[in-house]
Amino acid sequence: MQIKSPHDKIFKETFSNVDVAKDFIIHFLPPSIRNTIDVNSIQPQKDSFISHNLQEYFSDLLFQTKIHQKPAYVYFLFEHKSYHDYYTALQLLRYMVEVWETKRDNTEENKLPIIVPIVLYHGDTDWYADTSFHYLLEGYKSLPPDLHKYVPDYEFFLYDVSDFKDEDVQLNVFLRIILLVFRDIRKNDIQVVLNTIYLAIDYLRKMQNQRTATEYLETLFYYIFRVQHHLTKKQYYDIMKHIENTYQEGSELAMNLAEIFRNEGKEEGRVEGKAEALADTAIRLITKFVAPPSKDIKKKIYEKEISTLETIIDHIDELETIEDVKQYLK
């Protein structure tokens, strides 16, 4: 069974809103870059360049715009692994080449458009790799300067959502909510998670367009139910009771959310069955090819997402010590 990533659903529903993309560019890109992009001309494109087998880990959105009055693109790559991928710069380059090839094959222009690459990182560990492609190239820094110009290189803009501070009251409400939720949803402190959920509910309640707000609230709760596994049933129903008491059409909305909760509970049961099987496999392979894991490590393995378990299994031949294993469990 193909499990559609909940990260992908909420990311695309939020960032495909042109006002959200504009606000991100205006508030988070460096002024030298932001001021060259014509944000008023931004339009989302339907193309996606993520391969099928990587859709569990990445999402992308392409926006057409203008830079210096010339056609250009802003490409958002959202990395939602629990840890960051060392080869993101290589994958991003591949996607940009696909964008260029698509434009080459569908236009009579003999020039390729500028692409501004942006990576949003949503992981449990700090990003430690460089954002320049040449960082991946062995011996690049020791090359003579005259040789650098013959070696492909580029740099992407990185935004780590863990750095987000909810201070700018002018920020688009949907952008504000998604950055808050991405920052906090997988934290171990449940009170922090609950505070963020209630804050998001309050932001949406204050919107003038309540139809749009309630639609987004349902998307938000679909995401929360699929990603946050430590909230209790009582905590979920307390949240729904709060919505029922504070929203104009709270009773109907609470009923819809309760239905989502029941349906996602059934789906989670099926997913947990797969997750447990993958955890068993990961522990067996680690024991066989690395070393017997401790009880604490086994416990952490059983708590991990399907995507992380699959990655451990896929990279088992690269793991040499238990410390290598621990890098996936942070």
Image (spheres, helix red, strand yellow):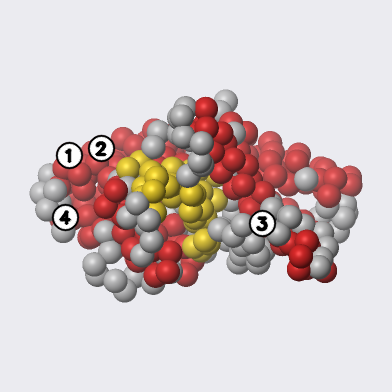
Circle 2 residue: 256
| Residue drawn where x is 31% and y is 35% of the image | 259
**Is 271 positioned to the left or the right of 266 in the image?**
right
**Which of disc 4 and disc 3 is earlier in sequence?**
3
**How many angstroms separate mark 4 from mark 2 (CA)?**
20 Å
Q: Mark 1: few, some, or many residues within 10 Å (few <14, many ≥20)?
A: few
Asked if the residue at tag 1 contacts the one at tag 2, i.e. Cβ–Cβ closer than 8 Å, the answer is: yes
Q: Amino acid at mark 2?
A: Asn
Q: Is there any visible trace of residue 170 in the rendered image?
A: yes
Residue under pointer 3: 153
The foreground one among 33 and 168 is 33
Q: Earlier in the sequence, mark 1 or mark 4?
A: 4
Q: Secondary structure at mark 4?
A: loop
Is 266 or 157 nearer to us in this picture?
Answer: 157
Residue 296 place in picture, x, y as percent? 72, 60
Secondary structure under the numbered disc 2 in the rendered image: helix
Residue 258, how many percent across, how many down? 30, 40
Quadrant housing the C terminus: bottom right
Q: Are marks 3 and 2 in contact (CB under 8 Å)?
A: no
Q: CA distance from mark 3 to mark 4?
A: 44 Å
Secondary structure at badge 3 equals loop
Labels 3, 1: front one: 3
At label 3, which amino acid type do we have?
Asp
Please indicate, yes or no, whether residue 287 appears anywhere in the rendered image.
no
Residue placed under numbered mark 1 in the picture: 252
